[in-house]
Image (spheres, rainbow, N blue to C red):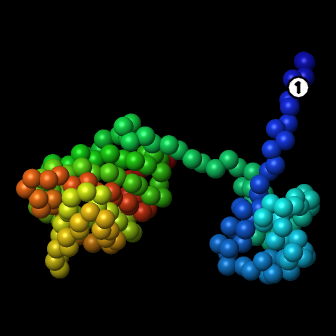
Amino acid sequence: MRAIPVQPSNARLRIGARLRSERLRQGLTIEQLADSAGLTKGFLSRVERDETSPSVGTLIVLCEVLSLPIGTLFETPDTQLVRAQEAPLINLGGAGAQERLLTPRRQGKVQLIRSEIAPLGNGGAEPYTLNCEIEVVHVLAGAIELVFRDGTTRLDAGDTLTFSGREPHTWRNPDEELPCVVMWILSPAPWSDAS
């Protein structure tokens, strides 16, 4: 078998930001991590800014202190593009709404839905709930009314409302002539194709 020559990319591996992010996520100061790993604060600061590269041994120690699998530092970030015109149409019920799922179907942490709601379009007469902790609605154009057990909240273009998806609610476009456009953010995703 003949060897295939591989040229190195010579691109510098940037892991400092990932180490810093994990340190901050765990609520550790740079001094606490440096002390636990047997490093100086200045050296660790340079590592986090990608100004110096730690040895393999030092990297292993840092990952052990952070309880971070070393391989996660080298993983390619998971990015997925959904183009507006290619976003799948979905039907969440209601009348007079065209809805597109703007996040990948397999995304389980959050869902972003763009709804174009015709004049007097609505989410149905009966309040409903979603299996998500947080529901956010942001109005891009027009107005929408969210109807809850204890009253109705009107949102105009630029307004945003955050509430529990488990709170019974419905919605309507109160305008008889103008459509409205809203973005719904649901977290965690109440449904996905994730397996």
Q: What residue is drawn where x is 87% and y is 61%?
A: 52
Query: Height in image: 127 above or below 111?
Result: below
- Residue 57 position, x and y percent, is 92, 61
Point out the image quarter for the N terminus: top right
Q: Quadrant of residue 85?
A: top left
In this view, the residue in front, 184 or 166, is: 184
Secondary structure under badge 1? loop
Which residue is disc 1 drawn over?
5
- Residue 44 position, x and y percent, is 84, 71
Can residue 99 be seen from the camera position used here? yes
Q: What residue is drawn where x is 77% and y is 57%?
A: 15
In this view, the residue in front, 76 or 69, is: 76
Q: What residue is drawn where x is 30% and y is 58%?
A: 140
- Left/right placement of residue 58 relative to residue 104 reads right
- Residue 50 position, x and y percent, is 80, 60
Query: Which three-letter amino acid code belongs to the residue tagged 1?
Result: Pro
Query: Height in image: 168 above or below 125?
Result: below
Q: Quadrant of residue 147?
A: bottom left
Packing grade of label 1 (10 A; few <14, some 14-19, many >=20) is few
